[in-house]
Image: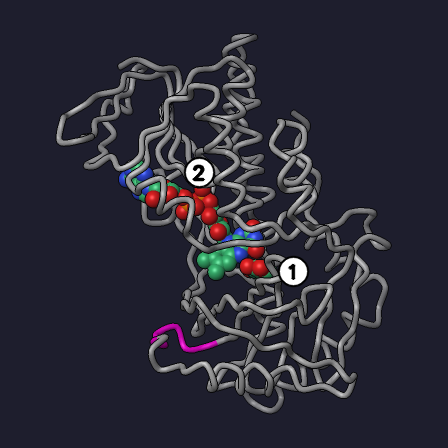
């Protein structure tokens, strides 16, 4: 098979890239190891930056998000028994939208298939070859049969555990990593919303987050040991832990319901540089990971492929390599901003077993300053809603 752009992975990065390329008349093939059903049902992110929302809207994918997603103009920081509102819209003129990642993926897959896009699920043994040449190849198997794609570019959108990053020459690649000594225990609950805005809470026992999915389904998280096993957590124990961490003097209370999903995720910061070598380019989690506290991962993936689609368009339409040559540097500027913000939010809100009373005091002082100073609130708000994406 021959195509212009071979895309490895049908997550947010891979699917959005193939959608953007299609709108520009550039042909692509997407290969995904998981089934469509698995891709469409894996529960992950929930917060879309304004840039992601605008991108979905401008490319014809915003309809269900507008109907079923919820636009939030603020978030709350909770500590010392009080909640403090950060008015994102007043401070930045922008907002976030809560709409689950797997719903975005369903919309993208439906659009790609409706446009007769070449999207293959359940592929195996994906291998990248001839990356040094002008005509790279992707080898894989589907339904037991060996297949090969000849293409102009390979885009690695295969997440943190994919194969593409490892195909970058070792001597060229520089990795930056930080693994945090905690994870997030996430639950999905059948209950009405406990709050009309997200609550990020800091408590001596650890971080907790109240988020939402719809009027009937809520998403909540609390800091746990990264090796924590979900079987060790009965529903009662979970509710007790969340209620303790969210205790307050504001009269606010947590609405409980039937817990129908529990999972634990580890937390790391990771960046690989550069994000391009010749005709292999990386986008999204394949190149960088942030701890979830800043809600940046999916949004960074979308921003990367926005840049990439523009770079490929300018090559195919105007024969100019300039934007492809600049891709890694431009993408990494946004990546490092998000890395810093996510690391900062994580440190401000999570507690460590080995932290001293001195460190606790510093953390509280930082939170107090963050909710009192307009400059500090603006800094948080600007980073949380995200900078505008490069215009398509
Ligand atoms: P992925 O979504 O990981 O997609 C990669 C795809 O490639 C996968 O489908 C995988 O099966 C496939 N693949 C892997 N290997 C191969 C191979 N060899 N061949 C072919 N296909 C392959 N981000 C936010 O912006 N906001 C949030 O609120 C937020 N909350 C989060 C909460 C949690 C609990 C977690 C875990 C993450 C959260 N994130 C959030 C991060 C976000 O989910 C990720 O950053 C996002 O999924 C990255 O998209 P991606 O397309 O780069 O990678
Ligand atoms: C959600 C996830 C996040 O990482 C975050 O910071 C806020 C909300 C969510 O899944 O709803």
Secondary structure category for the residue under label 1: loop
> How many marks are shown on the rendered structure?
2
Give the crowd class for mark 1: few <14, some 14-19, many >=20 residues within 10 Å. Answer: some
Residue at 48% from the left image edge and 69% from the top image edge: 187
Residue 360: give its label.
none
Residue 212: image quadrant is bottom right
Residue at 35% from the left image edge and 47% from the top image edge: 38
Q: Is residue 146 magenta?
A: no
Residue 157 point in image, percent of width and height: 40, 37
User: Coloring scheme of the render?
Assistant: one colour
Q: Could you tell me which quadrant the N terminus lies in?
A: top left
Q: Residue furthest bottom?
A: 357
Secondary structure category for the residue under label 2: loop
Establish whether ligand 2 lies closer than 8 Å to the Cβ of label 1.
no
Most foreground residue, 29 or 340: 29
Establish whether ligand 1 lies closer than 8 Å to the Cβ of label 2.
no
Residue 216 point in image, percent of width and height: 60, 62
Q: Could you tell me which quadrant the C terminus lies in?
A: top right
Residue at 53% from the left image edge and 60% from the top image edge: 292
Magenta residues, dominant SS class:
loop
Q: Which portion, as a residue range, is magenta?
A: 224-229
Residue 270 point in image, percent of width and height: 44, 54
Residue 220 higher or lower than 245, as above or below? above
Give left or right: position of 184 versus 197.
left
Residue 274: give its label.
2
Residue 215: give its label.
1
């Amino acid at each position: 098979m021959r195509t212009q752009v071979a895309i490895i992975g049908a997550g947010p990065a891979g699917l959005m890239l193939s959608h953007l390329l299609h709108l520009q008349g550039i042909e692509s093939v997407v290969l995904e190891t998981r089934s469509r059903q698995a891709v469409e049902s894996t529960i992950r992110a929930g917060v879309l930056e304004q840039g992601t929302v605008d991108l979905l809207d401008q490319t014809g994918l915003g309809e269900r998000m507008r109907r079923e997603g919820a636009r939030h103009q603020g978030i709350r920081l909770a500590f010392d028994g009080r909640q403090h509102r950060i008015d994102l819209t007043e401070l930045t003129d922008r907002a976030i939208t809560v709409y689950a990642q797997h719903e975005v993926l369903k919309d993208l897959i439906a659009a790609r298939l409706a446009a007769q896009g070449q999207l293959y699920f359940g592929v195996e043994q994906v291998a990248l070859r001839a990356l040094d040449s002008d005509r790279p190849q992707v080898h894989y198997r589907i339904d037991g049969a060996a297949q090969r794609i000849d293409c102009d570019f390979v885009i690695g959108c295969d997440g943190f555990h994919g194969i593409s990053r490892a195909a970058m020459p070792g001597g060229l690649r520089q990795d930056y990593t930080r693994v945090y000594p905690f994870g997030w225990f996430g639950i999905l609950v059948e209950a009405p919303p406990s709050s009309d805005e997200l609550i990020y809470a800091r408590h001596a026992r650890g971080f907790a987050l109240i988020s939402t999915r719809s009027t009937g389904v809520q998403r909540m998280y609390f800091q746990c040991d990264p090796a924590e096993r979900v079987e060790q957590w009965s529903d009662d124990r979970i509710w007790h832990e969340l209620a303790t961490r969210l205790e307050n003097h504001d009269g606010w209370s947590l609405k409980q319901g039937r817990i129908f999903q529990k999972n634990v995720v580890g937390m790391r910061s990771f960046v690989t540089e550069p994000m391009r070598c010749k005709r292999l380019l990386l986008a999204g989690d394949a190149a960088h990971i942030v701890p979830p506290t800043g809600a940046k991962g999916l949004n960074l993936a979308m921003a990367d492929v926005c840049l990439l689609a523009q770079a490929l368009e300018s090559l195919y339409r105007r024969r100019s390599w300039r934007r492809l040559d600049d891709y890694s540097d431009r993408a990494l500027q946004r990546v490092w901003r998000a890395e810093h913000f996510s690391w900062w939010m994580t440190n401000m809100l999570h507690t460590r077993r080995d932290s001293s009373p001195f460190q606790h005091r510093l953390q509280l002082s930082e939170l107090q300053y963050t909710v009192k100073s307009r400059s500090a609130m603006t800094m948080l708000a600007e980073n949380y809603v995200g900078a505008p994406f490069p215009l398509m």
